[in-house]
Image (cartoon, coloured by chain):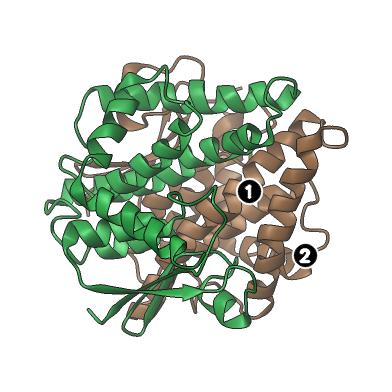
Chain colours: A brown, B green
């Protein structure tokens, strides 16, 4: 392992504060007690150097010595393999962690993100596609997550990077009260975000952006 | 490695044939020359046993001995580690493969999937959110993928499971002519799908569903 450097924006507007994806990485680093530095890249002017690390001009990315990694799921997988508090030790638990990292993004967030765009637009009630994306999130995803999370404390046997990712995805859904009918999902987010490492990560992100105001 | 068994639906309607996600897994298995069996689960009645393997009631899932894995990204990562033709051998290439597996799903497909729902709905021209999802796919994703793919043959140094996933995601975009303004993306899909393993996987999927008609 080389020096770990997490890069996020130097500043963002108020609404996304507390929800910028560097939070997921801070949270994992804090859980594991790994030493790291945070660097900033300009939000307003995204230079070629930014795209060299993150081809879509987003954040975060992590460097570990000579490796540079973007995508929160890939970074969490990398960190999970650096610390035994972030991933179970057994073969089944490790495989389940990887599977749920992908599921949090490709199944749950793939439905919650377009739904949240509709919520932000304020266009949910009248737009004929609004009902479609409601159903996609609620009936095709959260209904099933409710069954999964009603039967276990954490996704992969013990707490892991998959829980960091899934809890953060579901936390964004609940920003618009989307978990109101899914008590097991809401309780899971509550369990996850009650962890001291989450509180530290959130406070650090808020302080980072506030310092640039 | 145990016996590899890929499970897909017994039957699907005409429109998704050739695009059901077991294709990604068949393609990787064919590239690697790994021995595998294909099993079927009912499309019309999804039983508890199905949800035990795939909590959202979708396909595919893969069993490898006592492991059962869902999510096409997680299955491709698993297979990538079983065969050196599916992932570069060096540390950087392996990390890049993992990163692009996540990016294909969480960045590109997360934008192309809602866009394709609008295309299927036929509601693109008049729906005020249609323009939003067009921009999300074209300006925030494909424009950047065009730069990436204009500069390299494959995503992670040599052909890998990340290319299988990204090419399949982009192939679905081009079903609605979405790559018309992205010649490097279209050429990449052409390069990937010209591989004999893709042709075999596609023919096998078509034959599998046709046999159930």
Q: For residue A182, which numbered disc appears in the image? A: 2
Determine whether A193 is above or below B110 in the image. below
Q: Are marks 1 and 2 on the same chain?
A: yes
Mark count? 2
Could you say which quadrant of the image residue A121 lies in? top right
Q: Quadrant of the N terminus of chain A?
A: bottom left
Residue A111 is tagged as 1
Q: Chain of mark 1?
A: A
Q: Confirm whether residue B9 shows in the render.
A: yes
Q: Residue at x 45, y 46 (%)?
A: B105
Q: From the top left corner, tell me how far across and down residue A98 is, in percent.
A: 40, 64
Judged left or right of residue A177, residue B48 is left
Could you tell whether B125 is left or right of B162 in the image?
right
Q: Earlier in the sequence, mark 1 or mark 2?
A: 1
Disc number at residue B144?
Answer: none
Q: Is residue B199 above or below residue B132?
A: below
Regarding residue A51, the answer to whether it shows in the image is: no
Report the residue at 19% width, 32% height from top: B153
Q: Where does the image place residue B143, in percent across and percent down from the top left?
A: 42, 21
Left or right of B88 in this view: B108: right
Instruction: Name the image quarter holding residue A49.
Output: top left
The kind of secondary structure element at disc 1 is helix
Residue A190 lies, in percent from the top left, at 70, 64
Q: Position of residue A129 (x, y in %)?
A: 75, 37
Left or right: B159, with A171 as reference point: left
């Amino acid at each position: 392992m080389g020096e770990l450097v997490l890069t996020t924006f130097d500043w963002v507007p108020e609404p996304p504060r507390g929800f910028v994806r560097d939070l997921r990485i801070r949270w994992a680093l804090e859980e594991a007690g790994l030493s790291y530095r945070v660097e900033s890249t300009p939000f307003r002017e995204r230079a070629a150097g930014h795209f060299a690390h993150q081809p879509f001009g987003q954040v975060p990315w992590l460097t570990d010595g000579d490796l540079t990694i973007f995508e929160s799921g890939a970074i969490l997988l990398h960190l999970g393999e650096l610390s035994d508090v972030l991933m179970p030790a057994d073969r089944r638990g490790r495989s389940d962690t990887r599977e749920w990292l992908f599921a949090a993004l490709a199944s749950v967030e793939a439905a919650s993100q377009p739904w949240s765009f509709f919520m932000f637009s304020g266009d949910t009630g009248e737009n004929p596609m609004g009902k479609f994306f409601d159903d996609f999130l609620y009936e095709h995803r959260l209904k099933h997550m409710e069954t999964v999370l009603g039967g276990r404390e954490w996704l992969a046997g013990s707490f892991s990077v998959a829980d960091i990712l899934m809890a953060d995805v579901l936390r964004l859904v609940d920003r618009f009260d989307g978990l109101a009918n899914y008590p097991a999902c809401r309780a899971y987010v509550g369990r996850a975000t009650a962890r001291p490492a989450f509180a530290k990560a959130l406070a650090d992100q808020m302080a980072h952006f506030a310092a640039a105001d």
